Image (spheres, helix red, strand yellow):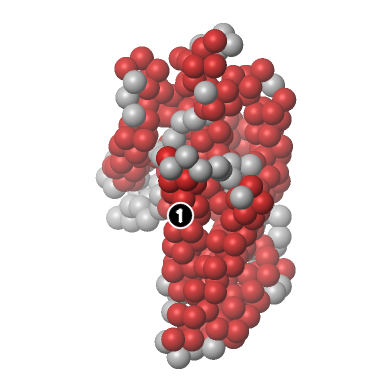
Amino acid sequence: MRGVRLLWPLLAILIAFAVGGLLTWAFGHDPFSAYGALISGSLGSGYAISTTLTDALPLMITGLAVALSFQSGLFNIGASGQYWLGAIVAVWLGYSLKLPTPLHLLVCLLAGALAGALWAALIPGLAKAFRGANEVITTLMMTYVATYLGHYLIEGGPMQAPGYTPQSPHLLPSAILPNLVSGTQLSVGIFLAPLLAALTWFLLSRTRLGFSLRISGYNPRAARYAGVRPVVAILAALGLSGALAGLAGAVQMMGVDHRLFDSFGTSYGYTGIVVALLARNNPFGVLLAALLFGVLSSGANAMQINAGVPFHLVDVIQGVIIFFVAAEGLMRYLRLRSGGNS
């Protein structure tokens, strides 16, 4: 059964693509042409690969944020809100401060990470540590607060640029991450993802703090016996998770959007949850899982244009992946309840 558990994410992906192919065929389209267009549209050229990596980058970082909290036994469902806060703070500092380029970039990135950390730790973290509040509810509610705060700031609020369009001023050139591939939106921010994955892995597996976080997640009673302070573990886990999510928002603003829009989405934080689950919270697995979702996102338009397949077939594939990943966890839970082996 252990072998099946290890291979289950791959099986879930294969089943999802098989179901998507059957649906494509059932609606009168050629599934091979559809998937061929998906692959060529996402990996078939330098521009396509750059677009795929651009789409995958925020998922890589938010996936790491969620994976870190999950490994610590906490369910940070509010990565989207922390992503928003990181974006808001990075944009504000990006157009209002005048600093030399290296310093300006560093200030905006660190400020975005700090904003996400405080958003996760101050209210959800303290409420969990001292009152036992469910972090699923508090982090989710804080996402709504962050989203509406962002809309207020650019819809007639203090961050709205002159004019009627709900958007912030454009970032100063000194706050924009350098472009990596000419003619695309891929920035040097892509190099942050493997670095953050390595740092997350090192933190969790090779440091005293990481041991405290993991043992708190696996067995809170054993953690207390080992001298781990629950309050410190909770605040550290949510703070670090929020910092990664906030950094993701800052990187997206500084590398891709360059200003805060009214239509700025919150889906990256929620999809990051799926990415973390698919990767089994492994930091390096998160990079691969996010890359898969980047392929689906960037190749969907090509699939619709070249094969005539509805764009929303990609949503179906993602939904089936989510279903089977969740189903494996449910089956394992039921086996444990029934006294079976995991």
Query: Which quadrant of the figure has residue 136?
Result: top left
| Callout count | 1
Q: Position of residue 175 (x, y in %)?
A: 59, 41
> Which secondary structure, mark 1?
helix
Instruction: Pick whichever, 78 or 302, lies toward us.
Output: 78
Where residue 145 sits, quadrant-wise, is top left
Check the image and report above or below for 224 versus 113: above
Which residue is at the far front? 339
Q: Is residue 237 visible?
A: yes
- Residue placed at 58% from the left, 45% from the top? 280
Q: Where is 75 relative to 25, above or below?
A: above
Of residues 180 and 281, which is closer to you in this image? Answer: 281
Q: Which residue is mark 1?
A: 327
The amino acid beneath tag 1 is Ala
* Picture coordinates of residue 184, whole percent (x, y): 64, 63
Q: Residues within 10 Å of mark 1 (few under 14, many from 20)?
A: few
| Quarter holding residue 51 | bottom right
